[in-house]
Image (cartoon, rainbow, N blue to C red):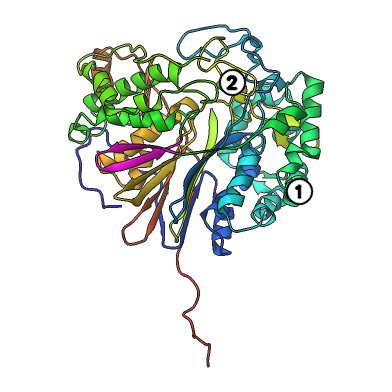
Amino acid sequence: MDMPLPAPRVARFTCEKKPATGSRGMVVTNHPLASGAGAQMLLAGGNAVDAAIAALFALTVVEPMMVGILGGGLAHIRMADGRHEVLDGLSTAPLAATPDMYECLSDEIGHQRDVRDRLNVVGPLAVAVPGALAGWCMALERFGTMALADVLAPAIALARGGFTVTPYLSACVADTRADLARDPGLAALLLPGGAPIAPGTRLRRPDYAESLALIAERGPAALYGGPLGAALTGFMAGHGGLITQADLDAYKVEIRAPIAGAYRGHTVFGPPPPSSSGVHVAQMLNILEGYDIGAMGFGSADAVHLLAEALKIAFADRAVATADPAFVSVPVDRLIDKAYAAERRAAIRLDQAQAWAPGLSGGESADTTHLTVADGAGNVITSTQTVNGLFGACTMIPGTGMPTNNYMFNFDPHPGRALSIAPGKRVFTSMAPMIVMREGKLEFALGLPGALRIFPSALQAIVNLIDHRMSLQEAVEAPRIWTEGGVLELEAAIPDAVAEALAARGHRVVRSPRVAGGMNAIAFGEDGMLTGAACWRADGTPVGIAGGLAREGVRFSI
């Protein structure tokens, strides 16, 4: 990647972390022990996919609030030989699910998914059919070089031997204390004596270690047709959940082609529907391409206003058009068409915030983790995985150590909409594992957690790198904004004067301590060097690998 040139900035900030560099590999995850697990695979001769899958299994141990084998996610993979795929391991609605299974409480923006008794948030009725384990095993089989037992070894060791609880994990436990207390297993694990587990505590997960060991022995069949699946379906049957063995038998990982958008000489690749990111990041970049965003200055009122209007347009279209393509005809070509972007752009007013309706009709029929890994051979994987909310449904399957997801929250609980619940329907998502190339060469890969705020934050990082010419570290740490048409959230480093100017244009401005989660990214230098960066919003840690074996023929002598 070219060295950034100076660009005007209105919002100034200081990076809290430093990047890492390496020539033979780079692993960036949101926990140092997971980054270490991935680095072990690279040092043992594995490739980027081996490292990523090892890191994901390790994350299920040390970040149980974010990711688990009963969750789901996307893996965006580009291999050095040109293979480029998105493996969709997102969860699906159980076959017994119905569009009206929840009682809706609101249709207001920001509250459309509120239902009575929070049944789509906490407890067995919030759990969708898991896809994460199937997706990870498929990625390893299609693109990896190592055995499943080998990539699982670091995670099993962490679960058996224990790890030190970080302040971040402890704070997440405190934030969900009331819901965690309802589940005996999670309460015993994370609320010893009734209080959130303290930072510095050594946490061991022996039940989960045995579950991982069973997967190492039997592969994904341990869950989809074996004892772990029986434990899951048995718990569901006894506690009002919907998942049955028929759901596990029917689950399938989808192999999808990425969406490609063009922006100022770059090709921006993202996952296709049911993910929002590929089409809507391309759509927003097409809208922004009509302005000299860089000249406006990072964090200026004009630049932030245009980002906000582009976000609102994308969310308006997303609500009617982006869902599981097996259930809804998604107008991908129209959404990413530059002529359509020009139509939407023509209605933007620089002096006035607007409410946006969809520009097309639909074809009816919270918390996450991310990693980015590259090796010296030119293979790269950027993967976002989740149990959806913090600790998912705040329910753990007894005897297995496996927390469940609450992915049913991602559906619109109102019947008759593009995002409504249907049996077997795949959840839509805001996950944005992105890869950007220029003239056929890798330039950078990035992603982050953060529910609805994910793909808008990924967009901003891409704009930071291309328009504002930031370094990779600056791009991932820069202050963010977010809106879907209601309030406009601004992080603290956006100046008060800018906030006041935006309010004068009609934006309902609120301050947010954090927009979305910890981004991690890798930049690819023309000299073969890899730069990894993680931001202050999580425990993100880049680990770079350089050096190598001794020169051939070298012998030790005295």
Real-space CA distance between mark 2 and mark 1, rounded to the nearest whole angstrom: 31 Å
Residue 514 visible in the current orientation: no
- Determine whether 25 is above or below 507 in the image: below
At which x and y percent is residue 545? 47, 61
Q: Position of residue 522 (x, y in %)?
A: 41, 49
Query: As drawn, is 99 to the left or to the right of 488?
Result: right
Three-letter residue code for mark 1: Arg
Q: Which mark is residue 95?
A: none
- Image mark for residue 218: 1
Mark 1 or mark 2, which is nearer the start of the sequence? 1
Q: Residues within 10 Å of mark 2 (few under 14, many from 20)?
A: many
Which stretch did the figure color magenta? 258-271
The image shows residue 539 at horizontal and vertical percentages of 51, 43
Q: Is residue 162 magenta?
A: no
What crowding class fits label 1: few (fewer than 14 Cα within 10 Å), some (14-19), or many (20 or more)?
some
396 left or right of 361 in image = right
Q: Which residue is mark 2?
A: 409
Q: Secondary structure at mark 1?
A: helix
Tell me the quarter of the picture where residue 175 sits.
top right
Residue 337 appears in which quarter of the rendering?
Answer: top left
Q: Is residue 405 above or below residue 531?
A: above
Asked if residue 275 can be seen in this view, the reply is: yes
Count of residue discs: 2
User: Which residue sits at x=49%, y=85%?
Assistant: 554
Q: Give the vertical position of 376 relative to 463 (above or below).
A: below
Task: Judge depth for marks 2 and 1 and give the one in front.
Answer: 1
Element type at mark 2 = helix
Q: Position of residue 235 (x, y in %)?
A: 79, 27
